[in-house]
Image (cartoon, rainbow, N blue to C red):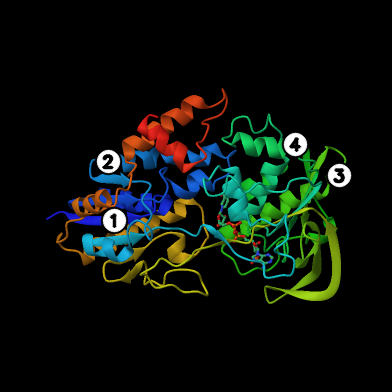
Amino acid sequence: MTISVAIIGSGPAGCYTADALLKSDVDVQIDVIDRLPTPFGLIRAGVAPDHQTTKKIQKKFGTTLADPSVRYFGNVDVGRDISLAELRDMYDAVVLAVGAPYDHKLGISGEDKTGVYGSASFVGWYNAHPDLRDLNPALDTKAVAVIGVGNVAIDVARVLVKDEAEMADSDLPAYAAKAIQNSPITDVYIIGRRGPIEAKFTNVELREMGKLEHCVSLVDADQLPDDVGDVDLSDRDKRLKERNLNTLKEFANSKPNDKPKRVHFVFYASPVEILGGDKVEGLKLERTKIEEGRAVGTGEFFEIDCGLVIPAIGYRATPVEGAPFDERRCVVPNDDGRVDDRLYAVGWIKRGPTGVIATNRPDGEIAAKHILEDVQSGEKPGRSALKKLLAKKSIQVVDIAGWQKIEKIENESAKPQAPRLKFETVDDMLAAVNGS
Ligand code: NAP
């Protein structure tokens, strides 16, 4: 009998899992459930709006979701509309692909002031995520401190300093474009608690910061070592570090007044306090040195005047009711993707918030392999039971045809160079599906 699999989450990890199951020659019925009407998780709401090439994978995943063996159940919230326990009763296997969509706290004084927004919230805001489009960040400041030296920090800085023409071929929503273009921001500080060699950004993203129309990227040459040194890394990673160092050396030669805006890379600085009254007025930092790979405070402090602080220090998952959770690592504990009897995890909820979209592909392949090893033949009703329960609860499910309607309207409403004009609320998405 057909094996029924429910995948919770339609981001890259969920879609790669569906893809891997489809590639097997086993008869599988795959249901992909998402709490939003729109699929694709962080591809839609996390990848920067001006990185449309990266977002193109949506097309491939759209084909996966439209496969005859797959059904998309959008607008179904596991936890609110249906429990994990109910799904496990209904399906032969359940896969958790829920990601890590929340912010970590810095844990320093002043974090509750107006003007502090974690990158998960801020990125969701400029990507029109329905939960975050009303964030209304206080952009009435000349200077911004972005904490962390990963790719998300670079995304945030870049989106804040690009002008309207540079964002014309993006899907930045109009409210965010207006807020950013009307803001007086001229200086963005990207702050690393460790050094340039330990920084997490990749070189394509770093180099992009040297090609901005109205913004120069700067770094103090004294913070850059002559070479990468004797690091315990693979040749590939060492080459990446060398490329980053060379790019930063180019930035060190830039002149601050060459262009009206500046991104300052600041290393060896750990945030200790966010300053100001109700609203952010500055950031206090402690200079650090590296000891055995860790940032250690030197007792020397300095301040950066800024009205906005965006910690981009990594994402955080939250527990899924009915599944175990490792509070320290913020993941579902698992053995190579196996969580419990016929329960699996893929993506960031499995291994933490690292890697690019394609990093999720092996997760999906491994989960599919385990499922097909563990479940010899289908015994549970799967889709028919889910449909019955959702109908009984009067949940409006958005299927693939519903998503395609949303997508068509978004594409057709876009300005000439832009790929789409995103719906910003769940109500508007549902109205579009209903043709109202
Ligand atoms: P990340 O790469 O893990 O970077 C997080 C940064 O925050 C690190 O520099 C880290 O420093 C710093 N940090 C953490 N805790 C801190 C603290 N308490 N105080 C000060 N700094 C702190 O995370 P991310 O930038 O959120 O990116 C997540 C994943 O998505 C990454 O794998 C990234 O490559 C990927 N991504 C890729 C792209 C792209 O390919 N274009 C775009 C966006 C995201 P330490 O190293 O010292 O811990």
Of tags 1 and 3, the one toward the viewer is: 1
Q: Is mark 3 within 8 Å of ligand 1?
A: no
315 shown above or below 69: below
- Disc 3, SS: loop
Give me the C-alpha separation between circle 2 and circle 1: 15 Å
Specify the label residue 67 is tagged with.
2
**10 Å crowding of disc 3: few (<14), some (14-19), many (20+):** some
Which badge, 1 or 4, is on the more N-terminal residue? 1
Which badge, 2 or 1, is on the more N-terminal residue? 1
126 shown above or below 301: above
**10 Å crowding of disc 1: few (<14), some (14-19), many (20+):** many
Residue 412 coordinates in the image, percent (x, y): 47, 25
Which badge, 4 or 2, is on the more N-terminal residue? 2
Give me the C-alpha separation between circle 4 and circle 3: 22 Å
- Disc 1, SS: strand
Give me the C-alpha separation between circle 1 and circle 3: 54 Å
Of tags 2 and 1, the one toward the viewer is: 1
312 shown above or below 259: below
Specify the label residue 286 is tagged with.
none
Specify the label residue 182 is tagged with.
4
Residue type highlighted by circle 4: Asn
